[in-house]
Amino acid sequence: MSLTQKQRAAKLQRYRTEQSRIAIERDNYTCRRCGAAGSKPHHVYGKAATWDVTDRRRHEDRERADRQITLCISCHSRCHWALPPISKNEIEDILERVLQEEAC
């Protein structure tokens, strides 16, 4: 039995919520950029990432906890809407440090 589009969307949302929770707990509810209290997961897609929203496997892959960092509301907003924004390279560097710390 195949899933309907609505069922697939609900399954992805549950997965996304769980992976975001894992990332936020891993980061101890702390913004990985400035150290303030954080509760906003930010997805890090990588330097060469291009995503086809119709490709479910890639969509799930980008939601993994190891592709997210926790940010405070201010830093998260700066990633998306501020001028100048926080650079993708800075965010990728932060994620790399987080994953190295986790591996130790």
Image (tube, rainbow, N blue to C red):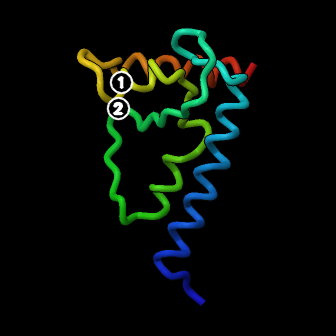
| Kind of element beneath mark 2 | loop
Residue drawn where x is 40% and y is 64% of the image: 55
Residue drawn where x is 41% and y is 16% of the image: 90
Residue at the far top in the pictured view: 34
Nearest to the eye among marks 2 and 1: give it: 1
Residue 94 image offset from top left, x and y in percent: 51, 18
Instruction: Answer above or below: position of 19 versus 66.
Output: below
Nearest the camera: 27 or 55?
27
Label 2 neighbour load within 10 Å: few <14, some 14-19, many 20+: few
Instruction: Answer above or below: position of 61 versus 47.
Output: below
Say which amino acid is labelled 1: Lys
Instruction: Answer above or below: position of 51 versus 4.
Output: above
Q: Tell whether label 1 touches label 2 (CB within 8 Å).
A: yes
Residue at the disc numbered 2? 47
Q: How many marks?
A: 2
- What's the mark number on residue 88? 1
Residue 46 image offset from top left, x and y in percent: 40, 34
Residue 29 image offset from top left, x and y in percent: 68, 24
Residue drawn where x is 55% and y is 31% of the image: 40
Give the image quarter of residue 28: top right
Of labels 2 and 1, earlier in sequence is 2
Residue drawn where x is 35% and y is 17% of the image: 86
Nearest the camera: 77 or 50?
77
Say which amino acid is labelled 2: Lys
Q: Is residue 38 left or right of residue 92?
A: right
